[in-house]
Every structure is written in structure tokens, then in C-alpha cells.
Amino acid sequence: QVQLVESGGGLVQAGGSLRLSCAAYGRTFRTHAMAWFRQTPGKERDFVATISWDGSSTNVADSVKGRFTISKDNAKNIMYLQMNSLKPEDTAVYYCAARTTSFLSSWSGHYDYWGQGTQVTVSS
């Protein structure tokens, strides 16, 4: 059974930083593309960032470019999202996801496995 577990969310003031982690259990994700999405109540799940299986390729949404960095540690089966210069509009539940291919995608429908989500709240 595959399981993705996010951690690192919380409450932070605008301009602050947080680092989210996504630990993968049950199988190796060394050949899978992974991603972060976020969602606010009543809205669709939005793409944040994606990373290739070996970490050599990344793609980041324009709304967070220059502020958020995605990375992964294959030895530990953990993916990270470093979030700097946070803004109130970054407030959302953040989800990590993995797909069973190595191709990057910003579409949530391409992802096969999802974590339970972690809340990030940025106060003004």
C-alpha cells in the first residue's frame, strides 16, 4: 500500500517561511514524478510545483516562482517545499502527490497518489 504523509504546515506571519515535507511509504518513488498542490475551501486544487524522479527537473507555478522551491531526497524518500516570503494568499491546505510515470505534469488528474494535506495559514 502506498502512503504519502505531509508535515510542516502551520501558522506564520506574512513574509515568513515554512518548509513542508512529504514522506513516501510503501514503495520507492525514485522513478516517479511528484508534486505539490494547494486548495482553499470552495475552489479547485491548484498546482504549486512538480519535480522529476531524480530532482534534475522542476516546474513551479508563476504565482510562487521566486518564493517557493521544490526538492527531494531519494535516499530518504522525502520531498520538500521550501516556502519563503509567504503572503496571506498562500493560505491553503497543501497536498503532495505522486504519479506512476517520470513525466512532469501540472494537472492534478495525472497524479495517482495523494497525501492527507497539511494546513498553511499566513496572517497579514
Image (tube, rainbow, N blue to C red):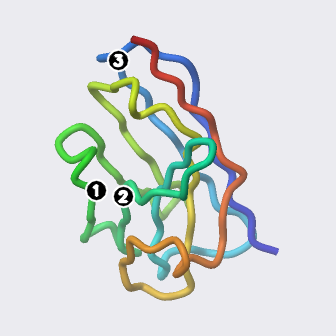
Q: Is residue 13 above or below residue 67?
A: above
Q: In this view, does 101 lie to the left or right of 114?
A: left
The numbered mark at residue 16 is: 3
In the image as oriented, which residue stretches furthest toward the front? 42
Q: Residue at x 38, y 54 (%)?
A: 48
Q: Residue at x 75, y 71 (%)?
A: 2
Q: Is residue 36 left or right of residue 3?
A: left
| Label 2: element kind | strand
Determine which residue is flagged by label 1.
61
| Label 1: element kind | loop
Q: Is residue 90 above or below residue 107?
A: above
| Type of amino acid under label 3 | Gly
Mark 2 or 1, closer to the camera: 1
> Between marks 3 and 1, how big is the CA–CA gap?
19 Å
Contact between marks 2 and 1 (CB within 8 A): the answer is yes
| Label 3: element kind | loop
Q: Is residue 64 above or below residue 91?
A: below
Q: Residues within 10 Å of mark 3 (few under 14, many from 20)?
A: some
Q: Nearer the viewer, residue 79 or 37?
A: 37
| Type of amino acid under label 1 | Ala
Determine which residue is flagged by label 2.
49
| Type of amino acid under label 2 | Ala
Q: How crowded is mark 2: few (under 14 residues within 10 Å), some or many (20 or more)?
A: many
Q: Nearer the viewer, residue 62 or 8?
A: 62
